[in-house]
Amino acid sequence: MAGVKRAFADLAEGQVHYWVSETRVADKLPILLLHPGPGTARIQLPLLEVLAETRTVLAPDLMGMGDSTPPPFDDTDPPGIDYYADAVSRFLDSLNVGTCDVYGSSLGGRVAIELAVSQPNRVNRMMLGMVRILEGKHLEDMAHRHAPKVEPDQSGVYVHFLWSRMRDLYTYFPWFKHTAASMRKTGLPNADLMHVAFIEQVKMATTAYKAFSAYYRYPIREKLGQIKAKTLVRGDGIAEMIANAEEWDPALKGDPLTSTPELVTAFAAQMADFMDAA
């Protein structure tokens, strides 16, 4: 990975693990990549490598995911998306990064939105992948089943759960509905890539649920209406809910780690066109 390295930043509650490009471009803002979940910044490495050819790129693991410190909250006082956005802001402060362009999808998208709403001077332009508005029974099902708390056990049953969920995430949405209507169009990635993704799942097995609890409690409709940053957002009518937004059809709709180099390059070009536009 020429030009890309791993590092840790210090926060009051612990450390943030992140990937960073060594590119330094004086006339371009850094771009912050906020990953979806259950996953980590590692799945964005192919995208980071392409974007790193022209600008500084930062891709942190959200708190409690990957190699970043878990949030300092117990289940009686769970963290909200505001905590995750604040941790990202303090991470940027630790690197002396002020304003940046931001890309986020799914969980990372909600963190990006909160960052743009709570600290509008921090976010120059924002690109959003999947932004789901979940309500009613669908929200209830996802909140209870999509990313539950995982308890280790001495027989290793939890390991089988993690592997099965990871495999099914590539095949269905929601992963727990094994029906024809829920099937994704793409198949499984190769075994080596699944192994890499599985190791990330194991790292955050006991703490990732905190972020998803925050995801499902986040008032997404209200927050979309508060965004001031110029925003590029995937379709599904979301752009109509944001004052300064336009829709895009991303060249890449899955994760970069399991996609083709051609799609990743095309996706990075779309992002660059938006960030560099007058």
Image (cartoon, rainbow, N blue to C red):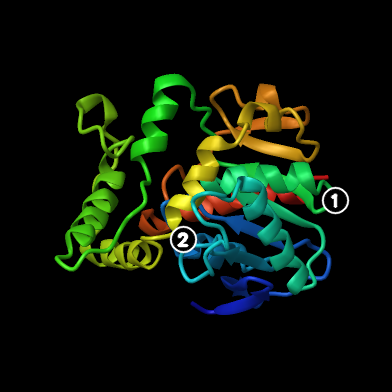
Quadrant of the image containing the C terminus: top right
Residue occupied by mark 1: 121
Residue at 67%, 72% (x, y): give it.
11
Left or right relative to 228: residue 53: left
Image position, residue 258 (x, y; %)? 36, 56
Dot 2: element: loop
Query: Quick check: can you spot residue 269?
Result: yes
Pick whichever, 94 or 82, lies toward us: 82
Q: Amino acid at mark 2?
A: Thr
Q: Quadrant of residue 95?
A: bottom right
Q: Residue furthest left?
A: 155
Left or right relative to 74: residue 117: right
Q: Where is 185 relative to 54, above or below?
A: above
Q: Residue furthest front?
A: 76
Q: Where is 53 relative to 160, above or below?
A: below
Q: Quadrant of residue 214?
A: top right
Image position, residue 107 (x, y; %)? 53, 46
Residue occupied by mark 2: 40
Image position, residue 254 (x, y; %)? 41, 46
Q: Where is 77 relative to 242, above or below?
A: below
Pick whichever, 187 or 161, lies toward us: 161
Which numbered circle lies on residue 150?
none
Cβ–Cβ below 8 Å for labels 2 and 1?
A: no
Q: Amino acid at mark 1?
A: Asn
Mark 1 surroundings within 10 Å by alpha-carbon count, few (fewer than 14), some (14 through 19), many (20 or more): some
Image position, residue 167 (x, y; %)? 24, 51
Q: Quadrant of residue 117?
A: top right
Residue at 41%, 52% (x, y): give it.
38
